[in-house]
Image: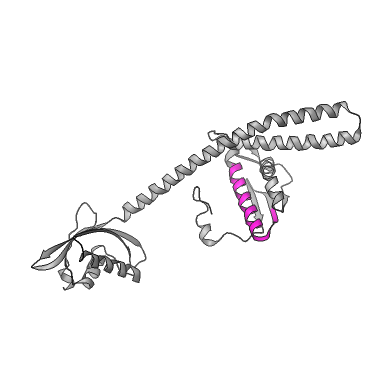
Amino acid sequence: MEEDEFTAHYFLEGRRFAVAHIPLAGTAAVLRGFARVLSMGFTRLEDLRELEARVRELAESEERYHSLRFIRKDGEERWAEIYAVRISYDGRPAVLGNFIDITERRRLEKEREQLRERLEQSEKLASIGELVAGVAHELNNPLTTVVGFADLTMRRTSDEGLRSQLRYILQEAQRAARIVQNLLTFARKQSLEQRVLNLKELLDGVLELRSYELRTANIEVVRLYAPEPVFVSGDLVQLQQVFINIIANAEQAMYEAHGGGKLTVQIKVQGEKALVHIQDDGPGIPMEVQKKIFDPFFTT
């Protein structure tokens, strides 16, 4: 079969749709003709082999339905949907095929699948938030009792050694209570609440929330804060989540790479802007991961 025997018709309001009469022996013409139908060129050998294999399958069955990928000469990836049946054309075996460019449809399907996965992840996070809130509430009551009795006993005794020990118990219990409060704030469902925040207090709270994990991972925390208080406008919970994620990732990377490390948290002021610089001495983020770090719910 000569290449000009490949017939194609375009319609359906801009959608690429082709009806082709192809003698079964004309595999080479099939490849050239399909490429011309969607203005595609082949740059990948596996694409040629895939299409040739599909054409050969057509010769062995009554009807076939396939989705095929093409790489255009300019590097663009396109997808086509082919539905074909064996026929007799001018007394010779042939294939009648419908050929539709479904690139946009596949893109929308992929986006829909990503949205579904994000919804599932959101539901999981909501469940985790409820669990954390419940645990935090359960811890709050005994901590309140510990703080109360430690304070009361310290007031009633004159033994300085005992008072020092009670003071330490009180200090640690209050720290645990603050961590519980941070957990409650972090887990609580609430709408975006824009307000003025002290950046130093915000970061100290996050570091306190991660203090146990940082300590057990042998990570030294270095704070380099601006001498004056730095205030920003934002949502407390959202900013907490951002900093917790960054610090947790740095902590995990350093521990897995070196069994510990140094985490530096710095606050700078540049004109009317506040800059938070978080640095670790881990292995760094691979290039393929860097492209996705701002995708919602992306994780490694």
Q: Is residue 171 left or right of residue 94?
A: right
Q: Quadrant of the N terminus?
A: bottom left
Q: Is residue 242 visible?
A: yes
Q: Main secondary structure of the magenta part?
A: helix
Up-down: is 172 above or below 19?
above
Residue 192 in the magenta stretch? The answer is no
Give the quadrant of residue 183.
top right
Q: Position of residue 198 (x, y in %)?
A: 67, 39
Q: Is residue 195 visible?
A: no
Up-down: is 160 above or below 58?
above
Seen from the viewer's position, the closer of residues 134 and 224 is 134
Q: Is residue 90 left or right of residue 186?
A: left
Residue 248 in the magenta stretch? The answer is yes
Count of numbered circles in the view: 0
Q: Position of residue 85 (x, y in %)?
A: 18, 60
Task: Kindly give the residue lying farthest to the left in the view shown.
Answer: 91
Q: Position of residue 11 (x, y in %)?
A: 19, 55
Q: Is residue 269 left or right of residue 289?
A: right
Give me the residue at 76% from left, 38% from top.
172
Give me the residue at 64% from left, 34% from top.
136
Q: Position of residue 104 (x, y in %)?
A: 32, 53
Seen from the viewer's position, the closer of residues 207 and 264 is 207
Give me the residue at 62% from left, 35% from top.
135
Task: Kindly give the residue lying farthest to the right in the view shown.
Answer: 159
- Give the residues drawn in magenta, as a range: 239-263
Give me the residue at 28% from left, 68% from top.
53
Seen from the viewer's position, the closer of residues 160 and 77 is 160
Q: Quadrant of the C terminus?
A: bottom right
User: Which colouring convention does the figure follow?
Assistant: one colour
Q: Is residue 268 left or right of residue 73?
A: right
